[in-house]
Amino acid sequence: MKKLVNWNRKHLIGIEELDRSEIETILDMARSFRGTLDRPVKKLPSLRGKTVVNLFMEPSTRTRLAFEVAAKRLSADVISVGGKSSSLSKGETLRDTASNVQALGADLIVLRHSSAGSPLY
């Protein structure tokens, strides 16, 4: 399994912020995972012991499931929260929601929101 080298980013908000070598690194890493799909057990230990929280503030079955399956295949613990089932529906700010998720020990947060740039709040 290829290791992600020289990756210094804490956040990945959008592809437009990446340079060519970073995009090539991500694509190389994705290609290295491809062989896993042909195995009987499709799991790798890459994210074992990590918690991934998917915050989907708008409906999206395919994208949410794609992130869930990817994280689970990398052995992460996955928690998915929809906008209607979060405190955002009661008026909590996105910043407060993210702070609460972080305080609960999330290692990675995947956010889908209708407002561009919302992860920067």
Image (tube, rainbow, N blue to C red):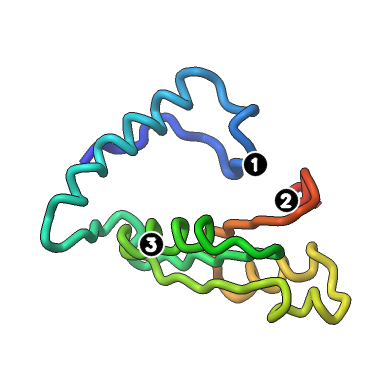
Q: How far apart in space, not on screen, are marks 1 and 3 (Cα)? A: 20 Å
Q: Mark 2: which secondary structure? A: helix
Amino acid type, residue under disc 1 in the picture? Ile
Q: Mark 3: which secondary structure? A: helix
| First along the sequence among labels 2 and 1 | 1
For image coordinates 19% across by 50% down, the residue present is 36
- Residue 38: x and y in percent read 14, 50
Q: Mark 1: which secondary structure? A: loop
For image coordinates 79% across by 63% down, the residue present is 95
| First along the sequence among labels 3 and 2 | 3
Outermost residue toward the right in this view: 91
- Structural crowding at the residue carrying mark 1, measured as other residues with C-alpha within 10 Å and reported as few (<14), some (14–19) or many (≥20): some
Residue position for label 2: 119
- Looking at the image, do the residues carrying marks 2 and 1 touch, with CB atoms under 8 Å apart? yes
| First along the sequence among labels 1 and 3 | 1
Amino acid type, residue under disc 2 in the picture? Pro
- State which quadrant residue 41 falls in: bottom left
- Structural crowding at the residue carrying mark 2, measured as other residues with C-alpha within 10 Å and reported as few (<14), some (14–19) or many (≥20): some
Q: How far apart in space, not on screen, are marks 2 and 1 (Cα)? A: 7 Å
Is residue 31 shown left or right of residue 121? left
Q: Closer to the camera: disc 1 or disc 3?
A: 3
Residue position for label 1: 13
For image coordinates 55% across by 72% down, the residue present is 80
Amino acid type, residue under disc 3 in the picture? Val
Q: Is residue 48 above or below residue 8?
A: below
- Residue 103: x and y in percent read 65, 72
